[in-house]
Image (cartoon, helix red, strand yellow):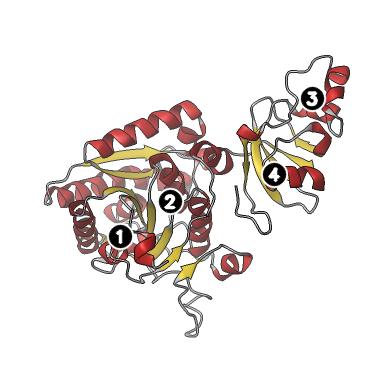
Amino acid sequence: MTRKEQLAGVRRILVKVGSAVLTGEDGLNLQVIEQLVSDVAALRERGCQVVLVSSGAIASGKHRMGIEGKLKSISQKQAAAAVGQGRLMRVYSNAFGKHGLFVGQVLLTMSDITDRKRFLNIRNTLFTLLEWGVITIINENDTVAVDEIKFGDNDHLAAMVANIVEAHLVINLTSTEGLYDRNPTDTRKAKLIPLVAEITPEIEAAATEDATPVGMGGMKSKVLAAKKVTASGIPYIIAPGRRAGVLQEILDGKETGTLFLPSAEHLNSRKYWIAFTLRSRGRLLIDDGAKEALVRDGKSLLPSGVTQVEGDFVLGDPVTCVDSAGNAIAKGLVNSGADEIRKIMGLKTAKIEQVLGYKDYDEVIHRDNLAVTVQPAGKPKA
C-alpha cells in the first residue's frame, strides 16, 4: 500500500509542534507560526478537522522576561509558562483569525485524564470544539504541573490526546527531517528511515534521547509516543516542522518524514487508557502458562498464574503483569488488593473462597479490564 492510499481516509488530524520548531533567538518565531497556521487552514479547506498540541509557552515566557540559559527550578518554569502561555495563544488567535478561524485553549495535567470521569468530560469538550469548527490548541498546564501529574513532554501528551479525540493521523513536527538510523548530528552517514512497519528494539535504539535547549523530549520520546499511538490503530508521522506546506505534502501522499504504520489489530479507547494513561500501582509476576493465556488467547488472569505480588495496591488499581523474564506484557485493573492476591496466588479458583472466606471474582484481572501491550509471535497484537 502506498503512503497516499494509507492516508486516503484521514479526516481528523492531531498535529504536535515542539518548541524547537516554534522558537528562535527572539522568542516565538512568528514567521514559522504564520506558516504553520496557513498550512492548518489549508487542511481545513480540504475538509479536515485539526487539533494542535503546541509547546512554546515556557520559551516565550523566558524571552519576555529576558532570561537566558536554562531555568533553574520548577517554580521558574511554571512562572515562565504563566507569562508565555497568554502570548502564545494571542499569537495563534491573531494568525488563525486572518483565515476566519477561531481558537480554543485546553490546558491539561496527567491527573485530568487518569480519572475516568474527567477523561470523558475532556473528551466531550474536545468533540464539541471540533463540531464547532474551532482549532483547539492543547498544552500541558505547566503553571501547576509537578512531577506526579506531569506528562513528561508534549510528545506523550499528544499520544494521550490522539486517543481522546480518536484521531485518524498524528503528525509530529520537529526540527529534523524525521527518524534517522543514527544520530545525524554525529555523522553524515545517517540515513532517513521513511517507513517503520513495526517499532523494534533496533528502531528504538536508533532514536537519541538528546533534546534541544528549548525542548523537553528528544527523538527517543517521539518514537515512544509513536509506539503508543500506533497501538491504538493510528498512523504516526515525524516530519520537518519548518518546511512550508509540509502538512499538505503529507496529505498528498508525498514521502515526507518518517511514517509509522498502525498495528493491524489495536487496543480500543478504554484499553488504551488503561495501558498508557494510568500509572501502575504494582506488579504481578506471572508464569509462562498465564502469559500464553493473556497474550495469545485473550484470556483473563487467574490466581493460578500469579507467582509473585509486588507493591501495595487495592481493588480497582492499575497493575502491570510481568513475565518470567521480567518483561512487562500487560496492564489491568485488579479485582482484589495486593494482600488478598498474595493469599490466593498459585491457587485454582475453586480454592479462593476456602482461603479468603468469600469469593467476589474468579479472576485477578478480567480480560475486559486487561490491556496486552506486547505482540505474540506470528500474530498481530490484540
Nearer to us of marks 3 and 1 is 3
> Callout 4: few (<14), some (14-19), or many (20+) C-alpha neighbours within 10 Å?
few
Front-lying residue, 355 or 117: 355
C-beta proximity under 8 Å, tags 2 and 1: no
Q: Mark 1 or mark 4, which is nearer the start of the sequence?
A: 1
Question: Label 3 is placed on what type of residue?
Answer: Glu
Tag of residue 297: 4
Q: Quadrant of residue 125?
A: top left
Q: Residue at x 35, y 31 (%)?
A: 124
Element type at mark 3: helix
What x and y, as percent, mark residue 313?
70, 30
> Callout 1: few (<14), some (14-19), or many (20+) C-alpha neighbours within 10 Å?
many
Give the residue pinned by disc 3: 340
Give the residue pinned by disc 2: 154
What x and y, as percent, mark residue 71?
43, 54
Give the residue pinned by disc 1: 22
Instruction: Report how far apart the C-alphas of labels 2 and 4 lie in the structure.
Output: 35 Å
What x and y, as percent, mark residue 49?
27, 47
